[in-house]
């Protein structure tokens, strides 16, 4: 099994990079775990308080559960990945079964900030994108997918997204084995990463 961690700032293009990697590998050989699934359940808090949660701080994540799930997959045991809703800021009662695969990709903004988690990665990747480009993507995503107004998105960006990026996410780039500039638009870098993955898979089969 090959475990890959793909980090990067909010709106950097991580999801696009992951999709292109998955599409380039044989069908059924890759499982993807999203950091977003492991945000703590806040159903005990009023909705108004939940909407103020700083999702860009490591404390918002249940790293212990993500690490436990990744270790189980490594041992060949399937796991039940939580389903998290940004609209309600709570976990669903339902889960999604993830089976062990030859390649496990863990994707999220904060995954390289936790030493125990990043020590489980065979390859650590950081997707870098221009801050202005990231902000534009965040505005589009949060207004369409998360039902937030532009004013709310911008306020959140200045109060938490930008400062947390500078404090936690950008510094975690130093742990990356490979940095992908220009996010999902950098086909050359994505092809290089895919080639590395394929070479590792070939070694495992020998």
Image (spheres, grey):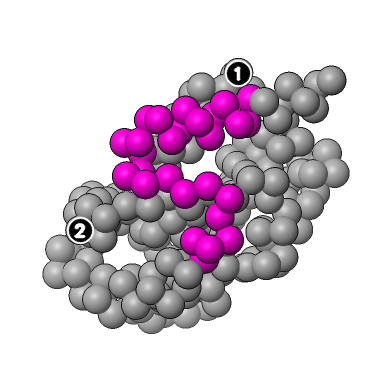
Q: Which residue is drawn at 53% across and 47% down?
A: 178
Q: Can residue 126 be seen in this view?
A: yes
Q: Which residue is drawn at 14% across and 69% down?
A: 151
Q: In this view, does 190 lie to the left or right of 65?
A: left
Q: What stretch is highlighted in magenta?
A: 172-198
Q: Can residue 91 be seen in this view?
A: no
Q: Is residue 110 left or right of residue 197?
A: left
Residue bearing the label numbered 1: 26
Where does residue 30 sit, x and y in percent of width and height? 62, 31
Q: Would you call the spot at circle 1 few (<14 residues within 10 Å), some (14-19), or many (20 or more)?
A: few
Where does residue 46 sit, x and y in percent of width and height? 41, 79
Count of marks, rendered view: 2
Residue bearing the label numbered 2: 132
Where does residue 98 sit, x and y in percent of width and height? 67, 39
Task: Kindly report the distance in space between the C-alpha atoms of the residues bearing marks 1 and 2.
Answer: 35 Å
Q: Which residue is drawn at 40% across and 64% down?
A: 88
Nearer to me, 142 or 200: 200
SS at mark 1? loop
Q: Which residue is drawn at 62% across and 36% down?
A: 31
In the figure, 29 relative to 82: above or below? above
Tell me, yes or no, whether the highlighted magenta stretch contains residue 58: no
């Amino acid at each position: 099994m090959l475990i890959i961690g793909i980090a990067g700032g909010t709106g950097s293009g991580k999801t696009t990079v992951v999709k292109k990697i998955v599409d380039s590998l044989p069908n059924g050989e890759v499982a993807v775990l999203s950091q977003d699934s492991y945000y703590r359940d806040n159903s005990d808090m009023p909705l108004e308080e939940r909407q103020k949660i700083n999702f860009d701080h490591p404390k918002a994540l249940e790293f212990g559960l993500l690490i436990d799930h990744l270790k189980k997959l490594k041992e060949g045991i399937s796991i039940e990945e939580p389903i998290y809703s940004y609209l309600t800021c709570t976990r669903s009662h339902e889960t999604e079964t993830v089976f062990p695969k030859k390649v496990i990709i863990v994707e999220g903004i904060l995954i390289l900030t936790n030493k125990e988690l990043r020590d489980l990665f065979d390859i650590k990747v950081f997707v870098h994108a221009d801050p202005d480009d990231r902000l534009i993507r965040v505005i589009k995503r949060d207004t369409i997918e998360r039902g937030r107004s532009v004013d709310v998105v911008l306020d959140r960006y200045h109060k938490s997204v930008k400062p947390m990026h500078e404090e936690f996410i950008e510094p975690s780039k130093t742990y990356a084995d490979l940095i992908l500039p220009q996010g999902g638009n950098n086909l050359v870098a994505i092809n290089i990463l895919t080639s590395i993955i394929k070479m590792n898979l070939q070694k495992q089969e020998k």
